[in-house]
Image: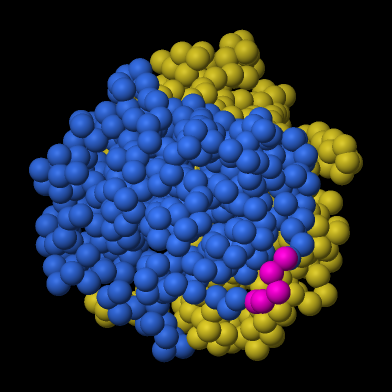
Chain colours: A blue, B yellow
Amino acid sequence: MALKNAFYAQSGGVSAVINASACGVVQTARQHPEQIGQVYAGRNGIIGALTEDLIDTSFESEAAIAALKHTPGAAFGSCRYKLGSIHEDRAQYERLIAMFRAHDIGFFFYNGGGDSQDTAYKVSQLGAELGYPIACVGIPKTMDNDLPITDCSPGFGSVAKYVATSLREAALDLAAMSRTSTKVFTLEVMGRHAGWTTAACALAAEHEGDAPHILLFPEVTFDEGRFIGKVEEALERYDQCVIAVSEGVKRPDGEFLSASGLKDSFGHAQLGGVAPLISNLIGAKLGCKCHWAVPDYLLRSARHIASETDLQQAYRVGRAAVEFAIGGRNAVMPAIRRLSDAPYRWDIIAAPLAEVANQEKLLPADFISADGFGVTEAARRYLAPLIVGEAYPPFKNGLPDYVKLRNVSVPKKLTTDFAV
Amino acid sequence: MALKNAFYAQSGGVSAVINASACGVVQTARQHPEQIGQVYAGRNGIIGALTEDLIDTSFESEAAIAALKHTPGAAFGSCRYKLGSIHEDRAQYERLIAMFRAHDIGFFFYNGGGDSQDTAYKVSQLGAELGYPIACVGIPKTMDNDLPITDCSPGFGSVAKYVATSLREAALDLAAMSRTSTKVFTLEVMGRHAGWTTAACALAAEHEGDAPHILLFPEVTFDEGRFIGKVEEALERYDQCVIAVSEGVKRPDGEFLSASGLKDSFGHAQLGGVAPLISNLIGAKLGCKCHWAVPDYLLRSARHIASETDLQQAYRVGRAAVEFAIGGRNAVMPAIRRLSDAPYRWDIIAAPLAEVANQEKLLPADFISADGFGVTEAARRYLAPLIVGEAYPPFKNGLPDYVKLRNVSVPKKLTTDFAV
């Protein structure tokens, strides 16, 4: 096979460890100079491909590439952008082929969640559909942990470690104050459809009665009466109550609870925030002081408290993607396969993109406790190993020393622009 | 001097390192068995003293006491409770004296912020006013950093490190997404009156243009027009804007901005949350997608990212309090004195409680930039050393391994109850 260049891009909401996958891709490609020429990164995901806005990673030193392993965010920029089908939106694919030809690209790596694997899958069809052969490999990433087949999605383990650690810490704060002040603390976590991150909060508890006392999943319809009863029960038993809630919790009519019509004094509808709503409800019904937190981006970018297990998996799927591609595979995604729970052993297999794209893996029913407000032992067994190990970034002047790449542009070769 | 027992209690909102002060007190007292008998801790601050709800710390092992250094929250419970003056509320003081006599207490250590130093100051007057001699020493603690005389308040350095780290991480997330998605991120931090924590967010920026781009202090009246202009300017220059805002930002009429009449669908006034309000305003005026975070308790309990400098100071003021007391001092508080900025050198002096109690140290005018939306070099010089050094807690199964004390009660000796 003639030497070809590779295209790599990052897509969707970012994570604390997506750059570790980038590191795995670039380092592994550099170890195979007989098969892969340059690695060009798309600036802002597939948009960089469509607009021929490419970054030449060969300008980055070995040290800078290694530092990606400890840097959150997306070093090459990400995007939320979904390609149409080849038949509906042929112009986009012809543009991609033109760019690939111009830059002699034979490998395509796309790093993201379900939507991104859909993009990767569509690009993988270019050979069969439009006669441009390309080895296309998806790389899993999503803090939501909702990709199918793979045991977990790189990014999730670090989020799980962050929320369980933060909840354990905040619960100690609440316990200290509850005698004379706040009695209820609500932590809102990301997750529109799948309750994985909320479930991970349960890891904060070691013993019966430890926080969190109540979990609210998107998979379980919110029932105000039962919920308030559960809060009262916790207050009676522990004189305090810690709640973790998914942003995507839904009312019986199927609407997001967070869409329940908050208005501010400017007259605008309130953006998100189910935790303040829950807190208000408890305050009004039970008359106790409530605090709430919405960490939002802090949660998925908290590289300072990343899981070593997650980091290793993120790096390994990046490496495996390159190995699959130079081994002649197309339309696959490296997936993590669990071999045992304790000790946690795993390896990497190839999942067909056709089976990964646009699938959403929700919390299984047997992970949710009978009353709907907690998790089962099966969930704990699944979650526990994913947060193991600390992987601190280097610090300088008291702050994490994150790398900023040079991100030198590849000179454009196409003579036309393309609007996205 | 005859052997006397000591009373120690924790008060007010807790911090990531208040237990390190407790560790300093107990370890130092144990090193002076010829002067201090038992250390009794008040369960939930001064309430434990008034209700004779005491914890015998001699049941705690050396290892458990040492583990306080890495455990957030308040190991003996805290409270929000302010004593009246000796003249107005004599019964409370007579009750304290009865408890002190019953348990042979000759040393009183009270660990907290401005209100708590007021309590300590009042107790210090028991000898002169009511004939019960007691060595009373306040121990500084407040994440708000608003105690006077001391260079900083233990608890603040760790909050500063947490917010600067978290903001730097979230800003990388925003930078990755801003091309096609969120353009503005707002981080709300605690601080009703003093803008120290918001100022600390500025440490996240290393270079011109780095986040945060706008700071909103309680010391600077919120001007909607100027603020929106500043956001527009950041969006034009950087295609993104990161804002840090104090919960206590005020409108021109002196009201808290967060009290601007948010209502939820249940018809209840919204609890706090100035970040969602700011985000809504920007969304409505400029039409861009905004994200916001309110870490709340996460911010002040984040022992996992504590500042080593802060930890050492918290421990040292605990030690110094005991040394002052056995040295015969009364009505003082160990205060940190800065000897130089870089390298940061400090020692501990005795501040009179009369000068500490009920004082609030706001951000000085020369720490706020001319336009009111940033900090000066003087502020950076002051803040920079406070976040230096990492002091990770031990981890077990992927989570911080925090100690839970036995907290064995001291048998009651008084025959009457006291209602608080």
The spot of residue A375 in percent (x, y) is 21, 40
Give left or right: position of B144 versus B12: right
Q: Residue at x 84, y 51 (%)?
A: B381
- Residue A246 visible in image: no
Per the picture, the main secondary structure of the magenta-coloured stretch is loop
Residue A414: in magenta span: yes
Relative placement, left or right, of A365 versus A360 is left
- What is the x, y in percent for residue B2? 59, 15
A202 relative to A189, above or below: above
Say whether residue A122 is magenta. Answer: no
Residue placed most toward the observer, A94 or B385: A94
Residue sitting nearer the eye, B287 or B1: B287
Q: Where residue A172 appears, x then y in whole percent?
A: 41, 39
Image height check: is A420 above or below A42?
below
Q: Quadrant of residue B144?
A: bottom right
Looking at the figure, which quarter contains the N terminus of chain B? top right
Magenta stretch bounds: A413-417
Q: Mark yes or no: residue A199 visible.
A: yes
Q: Give me the residue at 67% from left, 64% from top.
A: A53
Res A391 → quadrant: top right
Which residue is outermost to the top? Answer: B34
Image point (40%, 60%), residue name: A129
**Residue B249 horizontal side relative to residue B105, left or right:** right
